[in-house]
Image (cartoon, coloured by chain):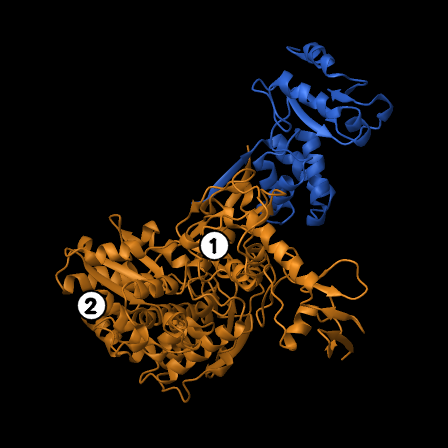
Amino acid sequence: MDLIKLTIDNREVEVPRGTTILKAAKGMGIDIPTLCHFELEGFKFHNKPGGCRVCVVEVAGRRNLAPACVTECMPDMVVKTNSMRVLNARKTVLELILSDHPNDCLQCAKSGNCELQDLAIRFGIRKNPFTGAEHTQSSYKVELSPSIVRDMNKCVMCRRCETMCNEIQSVGALSAIHRGFPAVVSTAFEKQLTETPCVFCGQCVAVCPVGALTEVDNNGKVLRDIADPAKKTVVQVAPAVRVALGEEFGMAPGSIVTKKLTAALKAIGFDYVFDTDWSADLTIMEEGTELIGRLTKFLAGDKSVKIPLMTSCCPAWVNFYEKHFPQLREYPSTAKSPQQMFGAIAKNYFADKIGCKREDMVCVSVMPCVAKKYETGREELAKNGNPDVDYSITTRELARLIKMANIDFNSLPDAEFDSPLGESTGAAVIFGATGGVMEAAVRTAYEVITGKTLPKVDFEELRGLEGVKEATVHVQDGLDLKLAIVHGLGNARKMLELIEKGECPYHAIEVMACPGGCIDGAGQPYHHGDSSIIKARWEATYQADREMPIRKSHENPSIQAIYKEYLGEPCGHLSHELLHTHYFDNQIKVEAE
Amino acid sequence: MAITVKINKETHDKIVAICNNFNNDPGELINVLHQTQDFLGYLPAEAQELIAECLHMPTAKVFGVVSFYAFFTMTPKGKHPVSVCMGTACYVRGGEKILDAFKSELGIEVGETDANGEFSLTSLRCVGACGLAPVALVDGKVYGRLVPAMVKDIVAEYRGK
């Protein structure tokens, strides 16, 4: 490797050629402040427009200050990261940014999590000598979509959301528009997100440094419905929430807080605290059966059957193929997502069981996701206008709810999920990480197809945080399952393009829209670019799996019971009615007339 | 629900041809936009949607470029486009006053078209007639050595025609 020597803050350092000053300094324990720069190491996400100028440093012999995030180290360079000139310049840059910002921090949804606020604190900004053009030259209306709130008055043009939307997700809903003060990141013709290719993955929200992009807050609805004595409130919690919520209460990333989470939901006042892991096991029964069904036909030479089967748990991914590849919408499984399977069972089976009318039951979900909010509103996932899941809150909203309800999360005694929709397996908890749905499906499919017990439950080959993974699982003589696992919609696009060209070698593909899967969903505590947090959640997910007494979905006694008592058999008549769905062509098309 | 954007057949074919001429290369976006605006006089949303489709790029990106450059417009031009030069020579000889005179005579701002679709107003940088500064163009005809008082008569020449 070509190494070069330079001096940063009077200390000599050796770095590989091509290293930026920012990175070289970081390696020496020098924390140069940044705003627009954003790197998610290990996920190929690097936003470095060099636009905000917060990271400027002094380079000896250079007339102007250099942005550390895009300036490469040169041999014998002498860099000062904290000279008077540098500190004054950074402060001025911040003051200029703040002069065009609403500065309504007390009421901002991002307060306490805002990177601009952090910088203002760090630089001790008290008075601003600049009066900006805010509210005079540019004033944007706040847009409420089903999932995301866009308040472009707060946009600082770091363009992280644009990079995420285009380069990682390949969705192409966002772009920088206009110039000068009115410049913001927006949609084509500044349309509502619902009228654009946006799929509501919310990764723009996950990387936004300020309050320009936030989630729709449903906590008001939760409090209203819990307070209503006529309502029975039923809550379900997604797998990935339990490995991330602790972060909001000062716990180390990767803390597993399932039992405290359950206790908190009971303390908040939900009548029934259930688990989306339960319906994840149900999903495996349905999706696994569908896979075996399609595969059997395919291997018997039926050319009309759609192979590969693609997973359909992720609502942003569902939106992606409906909006970008509607011609391929017969490939994904018709199985509803675990959130919606839960809702359908809660409002049909469980409501009957406890003698509650559908209209009197409120089904709430806690999700690591903002797309789930949109999903609850899909018309086909309702009965006579009454949705199976009434609304969804994110991990972050739940943390706020717990704090609002003066619950000391850290000292809560452990509690268990309620029965019957609370029992689950290790196969369900790994739904939260990329590769988990496929592994859970394989654990069940293997035993169903062969009739034998798996020699080893762990499929290491299906795990890992690489964007595209492929593996072959030997099931029995003559059947080697060829599998692919992708996360990030840009990688999902590659799979769809392979199918379109007829060159897809796989039998089944798992897709999750967010990098790393639901553990890095847009509703999770903000990671601010620290990918070690995602890694810790990922490891915790597999630890939670190992700690479960039952690790295969088809062995979940509560799942076996519901088939016996109510559903009949997987992919049977009632399953089709309650647990399966269909997809639409939602593409934007140009037509000559 | 699928969203269908309708576009006139002739415009559709012309834009497809322009994009084809540039091998549907997204790197040629600005040239494609130039030629499309030359043809249509402006860049309506449906034209940008089609260009995005042909060049295999997001419509948001196309709109980003259109909204960034002052030269591109999404407002249809009037029957008689008026352009006032704001190049250095014209500017120092009072180009801005000429522009103000056109604004008040036509009752529109730069980048706008009047309610009848008769006149539209733009400013531009140098038409290569600096000797005649300040200059304005109406329907491509150059008017030089202007003073604000002349604007009323120039507009009258075209009004209703």
Query: In the rendered picture, chain B carries what hue?
Result: blue
Q: Quadrant location of residue A343?
A: bottom left
Is residue B139 or residue A159 the one in the foreground?
A159
Query: How far is mark 1 from mark 2, CA to CA?
Result: 46 Å
Q: Amino acid at mark 2?
A: Tyr
Position of residue A473 relative to residue A372, above or below, is below
Residue at the image point whose x is 60% and y is 65% from the top = A33
Residue B88: horizontal and vertical position, in percent? 80, 31
Position of residue A149 relative to residue A432, above or below, is above
Query: In the rendered picture, chain A carries what hue?
Result: orange
**Mark number, residue A566:** 2
Q: Quadrant location of residue A54?
A: bottom right
Is residue A128 or residue A237 the one in the foreground?
A128
State left or right for residue A62 relative to residue A420. right
Residue at the image point whose x is 36% and y is 87% from the top = A453
- What chain does badge 2 belong to? A
Is residue A393 or residue A53 the one in the foreground?
A53
Disc nearer the start of the sequence (1/2): 1
The number of numbered badges drawn on the structure is 2
Position of residue A565 relative to residue A389, above or below, is below
Crowd tier of the residue under label 1, counting other residues whose Cα lies within 10 Å: few below 14, some 14–19, many 20 or above? many
Which residue bears the numbered disc 1? A211
State left or right for residue A176 relative to residue A108. right
Residue A302: horizontal and vertical position, in percent? 45, 65
Quadrant occupied by the N terminus of chain A: bottom right
Q: Are marks 1 and 2 on the same chain?
A: yes
Please identify, in this view, whether the residue under mark 1 or under mark 2 is nearer the observer: 1
Crowd tier of the residue under label 2, counting other residues whose Cα lies within 10 Å: few below 14, some 14–19, many 20 or above? few
**Mark number, residue A250:** none
Q: Amino acid at mark 1?
A: Gly
Residue A354: horizontal and vertical position, in percent? 14, 64
Position of residue A227 relative to residue B52, above or below, is below
